[in-house]
Amino acid sequence: MFFISLLLILYVYAGYPLLAAAVGHLAGRPVAKAPFEPLVTILIAAYNEQEVIGATLANKLALDYPANKLEIIVISDSSEDATDTVVRSYADRGVRLIRQEPRAGKTSALNLAVPQARGEIIVFSDANSIYAPDALRYLVSNFADPAVGYVTGSMVYANPDGTPIGEGCSAYMRYENKLRLLETMAGSVVGVDGGIDAIRTALYRPLNPDQLPDFVQPLKVVEQGYRVVYEPEALLWEPSLKAASDEYRMRVRVSLRAFWALFDMRQLLGSRINKLFAWQLWSHKALRYLCFLFLLTALVTNILLVTKGMLFKCMLAVQVFCYLAALVAPWLAGAGILSRFCTFARYFLLLNVAAGHAFIKFLMGKKQVIWTPRKG
């Protein structure tokens, strides 16, 4: 059990990316990008976002894209602050406000807005997402390829104060983006961001209120026979979370909804629809979210085997060192190798503990529909 757990951990984080690179090299499925200017609708779901929504709207209106081919809709999820007032101040520039009452969450907000969108392409933006000026052009250029149904951009977390959580989050996002690049060459990516995503309007499928749109909607696109691809040049900047408690709560929420998404779309985990994508979904998502089990098993079995030889003593020492590094990360300063290792170890531990917490909630049948604004 010890060696199986260890191999599964190594496979999830290193083996799968290497295999994905090999498959991508052999498959060689580049996206046939080309200049493309369809009518685009940007949807922004917001709840109590008065502090950031103005800057986000100004950013979207300033994008390098023809104004007569751009529609912006904000869905206020029964906001209780001045969010609606700020959005209405942009009405003379074509921004539309839809108010969802009663409050029902992001997924319901998108279900409400999509039938009212005029665009051939729908772009999903968070209320605090700041795009690079050319991000939209890069994003939609992928839809010149008729096989592409969904495109995700590249999220870059802003971390001006160098907090450990922010640094760990940024490192993890760089890893994810590299993996998405490899998966695109193989066929389709498995995970997307949600803050800079685009879909062909005709492929959008209404989701249950508890379903995670950033996860389930791309799976629905693959189910319809289209590709989900990554565009590294479509850049999005968002503030990273500074407090470990905020990041932990967010990761528990996302992990819980991901477990339910995998359960709801479990037909894609089989091999009848798409064997390659089934392997990707198992490797990148199912096993990744279950990695906390492998880590726990590796630690417990290693403790039980510690008297069986020097190998097990050394392996236990390595595990204990990594966990201690995660615990002391907040007290280490500077940009040295040890500090960076401890920061990454802390974030890695946070991700897996959050997944374990979410899995317990999943087994108890708990779901989460309502969300609160992401703190920077």
Image (spheres, rainbow, N blue to C red):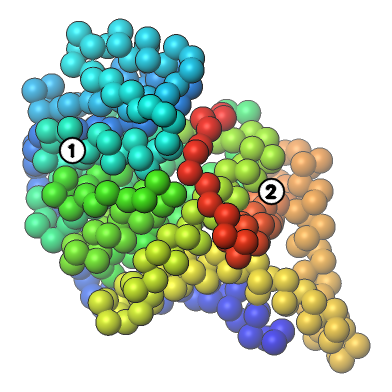
Is label 2 in contact with label 1 (beta carbons under 8 Å)? no
Vertical side of 358 occupied by 296: above or below: below
- Find numbered disc 2 in the image and state the secondary structure of the residue it sits on: helix
Quadrant for the C terminus, please. Answer: top right
Which labelled disc corresponds to residue 35?
none
Q: Amino acid at mark 2?
A: Thr
The image quadrant that residue 275 belongs to is: bottom left
Which residue is found at the position 72% from the left and 77% from the top? 297
Which labelled disc corresponds to residue 343?
2
Horizontal arrangement in the rendering, residue 346 relative to residue 253 (left or right)? right
Residue at the bottom extreme, as displayed? 308
How many numbered marks are there? Answer: 2
Residue 22: image x %, image y %? 35, 76
Residue 228: image x %, image y %? 26, 58
Which residue is found at the position 57% from the left and 43% from the top? 250
Regarding residue 178, the answer to whether it shows in the image is no
Which residue is found at the position 81% from the left and 48% from the top? 328
Query: Closest to the observer: 67 or 218?
Result: 218
Residue 366: image x %, image y %? 57, 55
Query: How many other residues sit within 10 Å of disc 2, few (<14), some (14-19) or many (≥20)?
Result: many
Quadrant for the N terminus, please. Answer: bottom right
The image quadrant that residue 321 belongs to is: bottom right
Q: Amino acid at mark 1?
A: Pro
Q: Which residue is mark 1?
A: 115
Q: CA distance from mark 2 to mark 1?
A: 44 Å
Horizontal arrangement in the rendering, residue 53 relative to residue 217 (left or right)? right
- Find numbered disc 1 in the image and state the secondary structure of the residue it sits on: helix
Query: Closest to the observer: 375 or 11?
Result: 375
Q: Mark 2 or mark 1, which has the lower sequence index?
A: 1
Regarding residue 265, the answer to whether it shows in the image is yes
Residue 81: image x %, image y %? 48, 14
Query: How many other residues sit within 10 Å of disc 1, few (<14), some (14-19) or many (≥20)?
Result: few
